[in-house]
Image (cartoon, rainbow, N blue to C red):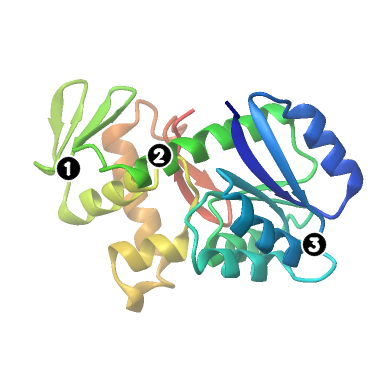
Amino acid sequence: MTGTRILLIEDEPQMRRFLRGSLPAPAYEIVEAPTGEAGVAAAARHTPDIVLLDLGLPDLDGLEVTKRLREWMRTPIIVLSARGQDEDKVAALDAGADDYLTKPFSLSELLARIRVAQRHAAMRNEDAPAVFAFGDVAIDRAKRVVTLRGEEVRLTPIEYKLFATLVAHAGRVMTYQQLLKEVWGPRFATQRQYLHVYMGHLRSKLEQKPAHPRWLMTEPGVGYRLKLE
């Protein structure tokens, strides 16, 4: 019985060595690829559960690798990169990555992101439960009802759609553009002020301390995440 199969597409030998030692068998099975082309081939051959992808590869840019993988696979992709600019994170997420960690990162943070990606993948591969709950909040998607500590919370149609979209991608960073397209439509993809206003409304209704949210998290310069851990 093997553990979680992780495809590591990374050209730096020291990083591959670090992750190989930090993600030991039998909990994890590591498949390594030092180039983008080798990574795409390995993804087809080994059917990984998670892909850890560096953007700065010697042959293909990591964004191109992400786009090629997304043509045929839904496996969670977590980008590990020294590129820490907001535009790099947004580009990776818009290309199809599920999450982004900037080097250097802690092992505990990586493990947390892997667990979240696994849960999100399980939700995608199964029928999504009608009722999704976290903390004191629950959403019944069949009835379109949101409750806080058992009491119904009145949400406007836009507030509900925004919250339901975050729930559908729970644990994953959603860029401003992704949320605006899904909730308001493509014509509003640049209208961030709408998003900021409605996120404020959701926090005031669902968070115990709206100014210091526990669940509805901002990823500065990138977007928002419904945090599960």
Q: Amino acid at mark 2?
A: Ala
* Identity of the residue drawn at 77% across and 28% down: 22
What is the C-alpha distance between the residues marked 2 and 3?
28 Å
Q: Which residue is mark 3?
A: 35
Badge 2 density bin: few <14, some 14–19, many ≥20, Cα 10 Å: few
Q: Earlier in the sequence, mark 3 or mark 1?
A: 3
Q: Which mark is residue 50?
A: none
Element type where label 3 sits in the image: loop
* Identity of the residue drawn at 34% across and 23% down: 135
Q: Is residue 146 above or below residue 88?
A: above
Element type where label 2 sits in the image: helix
Left or right? Give the position of 28 relative to 98.
Answer: right
Q: Which residue is mark 2?
A: 122
Q: Residue furthest bottom?
A: 187
Q: Is residue 20 above or below residue 188?
A: above
User: Who is closer to the viewer here, 49 or 152?
Assistant: 49
Q: Which mark is residue 141?
A: 1
Left or right? Give the position of 158 relative to 43.
Answer: left
For the residues labelled 3 and 1, say whether their Cβ atoms are less than 8 Å apart. Answer: no
Q: Amino acid at mark 3?
A: Thr
What is the C-alpha distance between the residues marked 1 and 2?
18 Å
Q: Earlier in the sequence, mark 1 or mark 2?
A: 2
Q: Residue furthest left?
A: 143
For the residues labelled 1 and 2, say whether their Cβ atoms are less than 8 Å apart. Answer: no
Q: Earlier in the sequence, mark 2 or mark 3?
A: 3
User: Residue 8, percent across and down?
Assistant: 72, 47
Q: Quadrant of residue 57?
A: bottom right
User: Residue 93, percent across and down?
Assistant: 55, 59
